[in-house]
Image (cartoon, coloured by chain):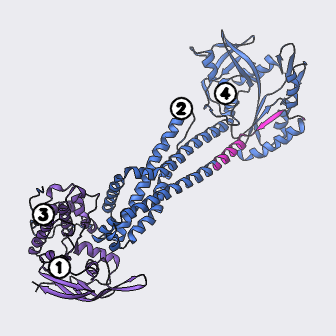
Amino acid sequence: MPASIVQFDDVRKTYQMGLVMVEALRGVTLEIRAGEYVSIMGPSGCGKSTILNLLGCLDRPTSGKYRLGGEDISQLDDDALSAIRGARLGFIFQSYNLIQQLTVVENIEVPLYYQGRSEDDSRELAASYAERVGLGHRLDHKPFELSGGQQQRVAIARALVNEPLVILADEPTGNLDSSSGVEILKIFDALNDQGKTIILVTHDENVSRHAHRAIRLRDGQVESDLRS
Amino acid sequence: MNEDPPITFMPGPSTESAPPRRVIRGLSLIRLRRAVRLGVKSLWLHKLRSLLTVLGIVFGVCSVIAMLAIGEGASFEAQENIKNLGSQNIILRSVKPPEEQKVSDKGSQSYVLQYGLTYTDINRIRSTIPGVSVVVPGRIMREYVWNISRRVDCEIMGTVPWYPQMRNHHIARGRFFSDDEMDDKANVCVIGAEMVRALFPLESPLGRDVRVGGDYYKVIGVMEPTTKGTQQSLATTDNTKAAADRMFIPLETAKTRYGEILRKVRSGSFEQERVQLHEVTVKVESPERVPAVADAIKQAMERNHKKKDYDILVPLELLKRAERTKQIFNIVLGSIAAISLLVGGIGIMNIMLASVTERTREIGIRRALGAKRRDIITQFLVETVMLSGAGGLIGVLLGVSIPWFVTHFAGMKTIITFWSPLVAFSISALVGIVFGIYPALRAARMDPVEALRHE
């Protein structure tokens, strides 16, 4: 059995919104193993973004345990969480979130930059990842010179460059036309075939169909967890 | 349309068999260098904005350096001039008393006017005031000095052979007259550099004769031109430039040739002035005793001269006053500098705060990709420091070049002390740190989730 990558144990998250306490997650327990391709689905307000923020170590659970690669990280401090984000997680966002003033290769380098890699090393590595998403000839282009699909591929290369334990994708095809969306999903398929663990948050059934396991949330709880 | 061939993700060449992990820890030089490069990039992206932002610092630094250089130059010149008078000297001069002047201005009567320093004064000073080492008397006449057909209106000073070393004048060529020449009442003279230009434009004056009235004087030396005073500092007017356009003859010679009476002939009437000595320089043994001796001389003179027909000049007092003036000037300048740098710093902080808000999303992205809070702080702080440092640098360059222009076009002496650009530059960098901290902290404190959502 493959190693456990993500382990949620009765994770709860409450927000203070003005005077009201909002319970975004009400006890989520789940486990994701290496090599899995999981989609997280649900209507808006079901806690999708909250669970993604927690998975991505951008936020801490109010209670419960979150183990990433076997290590309990639910109550680590800000610096430690930053280090984990940089070393073990790869983010792919709906709006690509590339840094506009940096070129393609520089954007891919950013996670390596904060890992303290030497410059030549990271430049070479970033270039090779750009090559692998088919943008080897666009290294010195700025994001605004690229199409949406290409920008998202840069983002994918950036998410992969630090060899993360798990790739977190938040509606990766949401801003793309259908053909570019298909391209991106093909890349995800290929990545999963190469053994990468992918967690995909979406509300699109067609997208979630690519995943091998579909987790549905409703009102901050797991509604269903189906493997196909 | 999209001709990029591979759509799928190609497997890596060696399935990432752990590439050489050269990891840099802490805030190493390499990290700082990268932060600097990043800063340059983002500042360069908004060239105009960056330039306008640092203008306050530029002008602050520039004006401080320039003003300091001009002030330093002016005070150096003043002090130099005062020093030329001799800091151990006390100079007494004969002054025509004001009441007498009024009378003589009428020009209706002819009479003899008697005033000024006398030989008795010298003897009194020499014998009653302790700590006085040398007393140099001097007589001054105004006459035309001729070399064949060339003519100069100049002051002829009869004095003693040790006058030059007392007053810090230097001989450029030839020599000053000797004791023997003094005793012999010899017809020798030492002329100023300015006079040489007028009287002997082509040939060497040494050994030649100049004519004054009916007497001929042999030129045996030329005085060195003193540092030319361009601004009228109190004590300099007739004392330092004196050496350049005065003619010196032995005092004994002057006494016999001209006596004690100066005669001015005016339309119809004439007036005579009887002045024994025009100038007396008293040398005090040690600088510490100068104030005391000056007081003693003042009292002695007051007792013996009913009219105020003399003037006492104490170079040391002037020097102290000049130093005090310079101190005040520096304090004023320092306050101006502080204010302008403060204003400049606030301007920079303002822009950096705007920049932080504008780049909220970038901050969110960087945080999500592993940037720690201190990475963000470093990024913004480095940017601010570079901004203000660049402003400081531009200011230093401008501030160093302005005095050059002033020297060349206004003819004023300027001195750039080596520390003034250094201090100005480091203060401007410091301003960057101080005013960069708050924006940087604000950037670092952002919640990454919020920052990522920022539009």
Q: Label 2 crowding class (10 Å Cα cut-off): few <14, some 14-19, many 20+?
A: few
Q: CA distance from mark 4 to mark 2?
A: 26 Å
- Badge 2 amino acid: Phe
Q: Nearer the viewer, residue B313 or B109?
A: B109
Q: Nearer the viewer, residue A103 or A146?
A: A146
Q: Quick check: do tags 3 and 4 share a chain? A: no
Q: Main secondary structure of the magenta part?
A: helix
| Residue pointed to by mark 2 | B409
Q: CA distance from mark 3 to mark 4?
A: 87 Å
Q: Label 1 crowding class (10 Å Cα cut-off): few <14, some 14-19, many 20+?
A: many
Q: CA distance from mark 2 to mark 1?
A: 78 Å
Please give left or right for residue A179 compared with residue B346 in the image.
Answer: left
- Badge 3 amino acid: Arg
Provide residue B9's location: percent of width, then percent of height. 11, 67
The answer to whether residue A140 is magenta is no
Span shown in magenta: B306-328
Quadrant of the rendered image containing residue B151: top right
Q: Which chain is blue?
A: B
Please say whether residue A197 is visible from this viewpoint. no
| Residue pointed to by mark 1 | A39
Q: CA distance from mark 2 to mark 3?
A: 65 Å
| Residue pointed to by mark 4 | B243
Label number found at residue A132: 3
